[in-house]
Image (cartoon, rainbow, N blue to C red):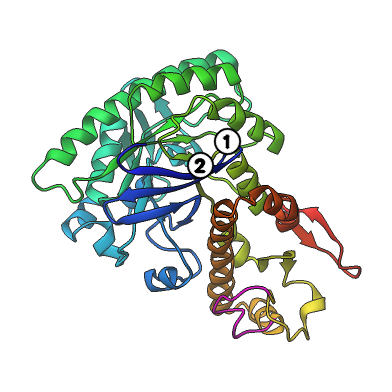
């Protein structure tokens, strides 16, 4: 095992582990709560995150570079001080936003030139720039700058992109080592995770994974999925890559997903997850429960005095009814967003806790059989049957 990651238990490919960061230990598998601009959309504070079981906060390099500026955050002592969060933080490299938000971009070996989605200002970002920004933010885990290609894309383009992403990763490693050694660095223990790419071409995925594994980084991610491929294509790709990922390093599946996706990802050897889904769905009145997904827009809940989920112990379920939450949404009260997002993030953090407990007890497969399909499905009426899976 590595100095920072300990593999505690394994059931099939599913792994129970522990990962040490400069701001605390992370029990895996883990879901990282996404606060792109150093805040959870829906009005949750750092104190709220502590109370609902968040282990790792995820913020975005590109967005914080654009606003308020990574230099300002560095002046104020780094992202932990800025948002008063004392636990581990992972920062995405900004690569995904470059390729998803920028309509006009110029990709070269040096990096990518594009225009800000906020004010149209010209921005250049490459491996060194991404590492500098993330160093200023002072996160515990810095993600490598990569190209996230759309699916489908031509094989030859994806092959060339993988080669460039590998070269960018080597530059990221060199740059971050220099920033960590600087006397004024915010977090000298900041760790770099490499990102595996290759779309759904298994031979490219495997070759790329073999190449970047030689850099012996603290962790590795599978990127470029959940961007248009089918769930089965995603699962098949994870299975193909997992065999070649270092066993003694954490594995991170980026941007995934539904509760069922997470359970199936764990079953295939993934340790870290993130997704905007629980917060986004909460803002639209869709609540995850241990029986499936409920939609507060359904008139069925107009006089429903039951909590959102009778099997949930979150602050929302302990105090409020479905009828009240439905009223808040219909009245477009900001409190609706806060309460529903709080419930959904609590649910996701509890999901990971139950997965870890199942792995500790050697009963993960039984947990998987019971919940993999149920948790990602809508509860329909009037028969209360579970159907219409939500993607």
> Is residue 218 toward the left or the right of residue 280 in the image?
left
Whether pointer 1 and pointer 2 mark residues with C-beta atoms closer than 8 Å, the reply is yes
Q: Residue furthest front?
A: 361
Can residue 391 be seen here? no
Q: Please give the name of the residue rendered at 29% of the width and 67% of the height, measured from the top-left corner.
A: 84
Q: Give how far across and how far down residue 192 sits, in percent.
A: 32, 37
Q: Give neighbour class at mark 2: few <14, some 14-19, many 20+ (Cα, 10 Å).
A: some
> Is residue 45 toward the left or the right of residue 310 in the image?
left
Q: Give how far across and how far down residue 71 sits, in percent.
A: 20, 51
Q: Which residue is mark 1?
A: 225
Q: Magenta span has 196? A: no
Q: Quadrant of residue 219?
A: top left
Q: Which residue is mark 2?
A: 254
Give the answer, above or below, for where 264 lies relative to 309.
above
> Is residue 59 toward the left or the right of residue 150 in the image?
left
Callout 1: SS: loop
Which numbered circle lies on residue 249? Answer: none
Q: Which residues are magenta?
A: 311-321
Q: Residue furthest right?
A: 383
Q: Please give the name of the residue rendered at 65% of the width and 43% of the height, measured from the top-left corner.
A: 264
Callout 2: SS: loop
Q: Magenta span has 317? A: yes
Q: Residue furthest left?
A: 183
């Amino acid at each position: 095992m590595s100095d920072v990651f300990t593999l505690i238990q394994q059931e099939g490919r599913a792994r129970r582990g522990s990962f040490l960061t400069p701001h605390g230990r992370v029990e895996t598998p883990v879901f990282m709560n996404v606060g792109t601009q150093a805040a959870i959309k829906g009005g949750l504070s750092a104190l709220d995150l502590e109370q609902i079981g968040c282990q790792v906060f995820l913020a975005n390099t590109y967005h914080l570079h654009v606003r308020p500026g990574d230099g300002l955050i560095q002046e104020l002592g780094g992202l932990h001080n800025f948002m008063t969060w004392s636990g581990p933080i992972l920062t995405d490299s900004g690569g995904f936003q470059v390729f998803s938000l920028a309509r006009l971009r110029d990709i070269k070996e040096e990096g990518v030139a594009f225009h800000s989605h906020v004010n149209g200002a010209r921005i250049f970002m490459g491996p060194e720039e991404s590492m500098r920004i993330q160093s200023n933010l002072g996160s515990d885990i810095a993600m490598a700058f990569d190209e996230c290609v759309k699916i489908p894309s031509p094989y030859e383009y994806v092959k060339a992109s993988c080669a460039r992403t590998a070269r960018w990763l080597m530059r990221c490693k060199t740059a971050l080592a220099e920033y960590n050694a600087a006397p004024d660095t915010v977090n000298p223990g900041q760790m770099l995770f490499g990102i595996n790419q290759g779309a759904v071409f298994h031979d490219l995925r495997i070759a790329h994974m073999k190449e970047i594994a030689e850099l012996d980084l603290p962790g590795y991610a599978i990127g470029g999925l959940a961007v248009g491929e089918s769930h089965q294509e995603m699962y098949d790709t994870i299975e193909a890559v997992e065999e070649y990922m270092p066993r003694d390093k954490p594995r991170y599946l980026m941007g995934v997903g539904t509760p069922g996706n997470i359970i199936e990802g764990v079953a295939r050897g993934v340790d870290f997850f993130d997704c905007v889904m629980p917060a986004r769905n909460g803002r639209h009145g869709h609540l995850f429960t241990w029986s499936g997904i409920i939609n507060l827009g359904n008139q069925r809940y107009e006089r429903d005095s039951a909590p959102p989920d009778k099997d949930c112990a979150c602050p929302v379920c302990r105090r409020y009814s479905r009828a009240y939450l439905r009223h808040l949404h219909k009245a477009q009260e900001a409190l609706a967003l806060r309460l529903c997002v709080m419930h959904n993030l609590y649910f996701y953090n509890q999901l990971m806790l139950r997965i870890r407990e199942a792995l500790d007890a050697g009963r993960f497969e039984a947990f998987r059989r019971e919940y993999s399909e149920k948790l990602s499905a809508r509860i329909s009426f009037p028969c209360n049957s579970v159907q219409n899976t939500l993607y």
